Amino acid sequence: MSPAEEVLLTCEEKMLKTISEAKTEMVNIRTGKPNPMLLDKISIDYYGTPTPLRQIANVSSPDGQSLVIQPYDRTALTNIEKAILKSNLGVTPNNDSVVIRINFPPLTEETRKELVKKIKKMGEDFKVAIRNVRRDATETIKKMKKSENLPEDEVKANTDEVQKLTDKYIEEVDKIVADKEKEILE
């Protein structure tokens, strides 16, 4: 594999990582319907060890307005409740000594518009990250022109390939943002 191909491979890996991050961040934004994945970032102090919620409890969405958390060990209920309160999700857990219920009130029109603004800004940030990867890759390829004696046409072909990758992944970010916007406005 030539050094220029390695640069392209690294460039694509970084862009894919940005896309993966974008998807993860978008899942964590609350929409009208609660998604059990909202709680994925929450970790609970379980016998002195920070443990992901999904490892110590079953999370389900029985209806379109709430989540039910059923711990495998009832002694963890209060720690789960505390962790949810600390998580800044903007919801209040209801502990009935067996399960924890979290009710999600329907979003107001104003809240929906704010969320759409927020995801559009996040989308722009992810696009900037992708463009930064492009910039780094093209600079590296141009430096190779001198250090590796890369021919001009090969430099051009590789920078064109980097631009194609950039366009592809920016389009992907736009699609992720558009899907999330549609979900919020439903």
Image (tube, rainbow, N blue to C red):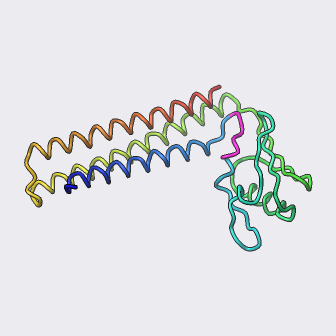
In the image: residue 95, left or right of residue 41: right
Is 81 one of the magenta-colored residues?
no
Is 35 one of the magenta-colored residues?
yes
Residue 19, percent from left and from top: 45, 44
Which residues are the magenta region? Answer: 32-37
**Residue extending furthest toward the bottom:** 48
**Residue extending furthest toward the right:** 97
The residue that appears at 27% across and 39% down in the rendered structure is 163
The residue that appears at 50% across and 45% down in the rendered structure is 22
Location of residue 131 (image quadrant): top left
The residue that appears at 65% across and 31% down in the rendered structure is 110
Q: Main secondary structure of the magenta part?
A: loop
Residue 49, percent from left and from top: 70, 71
Question: For this rendering, which residue is in front, 102 or 125?
Answer: 102
Question: For this rendering, which residue is in front, 175 or 3?
Answer: 3
The residue that appears at 71% across and 39% down in the rendered structure is 34
Residue 50 to residue 166: above or below: below
**Residue extending furthest toward the front:** 1
In the image: residue 103, left or right of residue 17: right
Location of residue 55 (image quadrant): bottom right
- Location of the C terminus (image quadrant): top right
- Location of the N terminus (image quadrant): bottom left
Residue 116, percent from left and from top: 56, 33
Residue 129, percent from left and from top: 39, 48
In the image: residue 145, left or right of residue 28: left
